[in-house]
Amino acid sequence: MDKWRVALIGCGGIAHGKHLPALAAREDVKLVGFCDLELDRARRAAVQYGTPDAIVTTDYRAVLTPAVDIVYVLTTNDAHAALSIAALEAGKHVLCEKPMAVTSAEAEAMVAAAKTAGKILTVGFQSRFRADVQYLKQLCDAGELGHIYFAKALAVRRRGVPTWGSFLSRAKQGGGPLIDIGSHALDLTLWLMNNYAPRVVMGATHHELAREPHPANAWGPWDPAAFTVEEAAFGMIQMANGATILLEATWALNTLDVGEAQAVLCGTKAGADMKDGLRINGEHHGRLYTFTPEMSGGGVAFFAARTPEDTGRLEIEHFLRAVRGEAEPVVKPEETLVVTRILEALYQSAERGEPVFLASPPGGTPHGGPAS
Ligand SMILES: NC(=O)c1ccc[n+]([C@@H]2O[C@H](COP(=O)([O-])OP(=O)(O)OC[C@H]3O[C@@H](n4cnc5c(N)ncnc54)[C@H](O)[C@@H]3O)[C@@H](O)[C@H]2O)c1
């Protein structure tokens, strides 16, 4: 069987943590290109996972050769758009890590490049492949929650500031927990609601605990001088159909109410949350109920995608299905463009101290004018 020839641009934490093990486990894939600005990282990944003649380079253009079919863009956020567009223009299918891009203009250009090239572009929101999320998506799509008019997108860490790499750098990442882990929570929430029409957002960011190093952090104390992004962000998003989403995204917050890549959904027929595993709530024959579906596949752990490794495996499985033309990608770039648009508007709102409108209300011009 011919194998898909895959190249990676960016050989850091997520390459080793998610993609390389999942790609290496596939018989229909060979890893033929490794690019990183730090040559040692590209070399290390190539030695461990690559073909003997794999390309090892610091220049992304070297992996955009006819000898490559698929490119994984796994760099810091600042380079996602330019590298994905270059790869699409070179005729490659692309999986770009989340967040799709820093700005909505970049994300729009990525969608346009994929259309022009006629290639698959998807984004690494692997939480969509979790067993609980897949199950809840089925319920939502079948209308079992009714009209979902209130939701929370939750990404709350107590002391989980990523102190490695460039996560604290606004220039490299475009923001802090809002664009980092808030993007996962918002992506899940919009996808489950199947609602991609935001109307207006109000956002607030905080830079309070970041001013001093805190030794209790999961990845060690941070350097306050390097901490140029927010440590916490909160937002309210009103959708065109009147639905409200509250978003909480923190790396550091004095709270015991933590949870990440979670959505709370409240519909006219039922609700759902993911507090201690998936719970569905509602009213049945005059009684309130709470229902906790079993995610372990009837006791056979093999069937459940619970671990990060499993979601990585399912992510590549579905991506390759889309590349073969057998299915639509599960994570569509038109959807993740809306995630980027909302995150960008939340940052703008926080900076300006006023709401940012993304669409006019039915029949009128919004007070404050459209988003710039
Ligand atoms: N899906 C997830 O849950 C998840 C988890 C962690 C990180 N991520 C995302 O993955 C991306 C990378 O994060 P990470 O933790 O691996 O960071 P990292 O700093 O460990 O690795 C990034 C690598 O990209 C390289 N790089 C940067 N710009 C480059 C360029 N122009 N050309 C070639 N190489 C370049 C850097 O040298 C570095 O080795 C980020 O966008 C992050 O948001 C996603």
Image: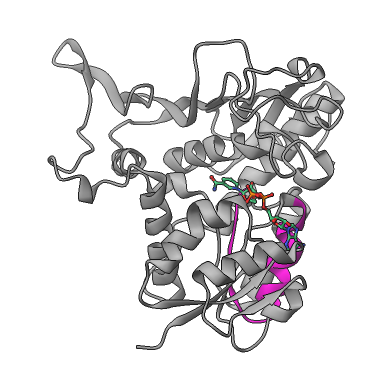
Which residue is more in the foreground, 26 or 278? 26
Q: Quadrant of the C terminus?
A: top right
Taking the image as shown, residue 231 lies to the left or right of residue 74, namely: right
- The residue sitting at 74% across, 39% down in the picture is 344
Q: Quadrant of the N terminus?
A: bottom left
Taking the image as shown, residue 224 lies to the left or right of residue 360, namely: right
- Whole-percent x and y of residue 170? 81, 39
Q: Is residue 365 visible?
A: no
Vertically, is 166 above or below 202?
Answer: below
> Quadrant of residue 130 in the image?
top left
Which residue is more in the foreground, 33 or 271? 33
Vertically, is 339 above or below 329?
Answer: above
Is 98 colored magenta in this rendering?
A: yes
Number of marks in the rendered image: 0
Vertically, is 156 above or below 361?
Answer: above
> Quadrant of residue 365 in the image?
top right
- Whole-percent x and y of residue 267? 38, 26
- Whole-percent x and y of residue 178? 67, 33
Which residue is more in the foreground, 272 or 194? 272
Q: Which residues are magenta?
A: 78-99
- The residue sitting at 23% across, 26% down in the picture is 292
Is 117 colored magenta in this rendering?
A: no
- The residue sitting at 79% across, 25% down in the picture is 350
- Whole-percent x and y of residue 164? 69, 40
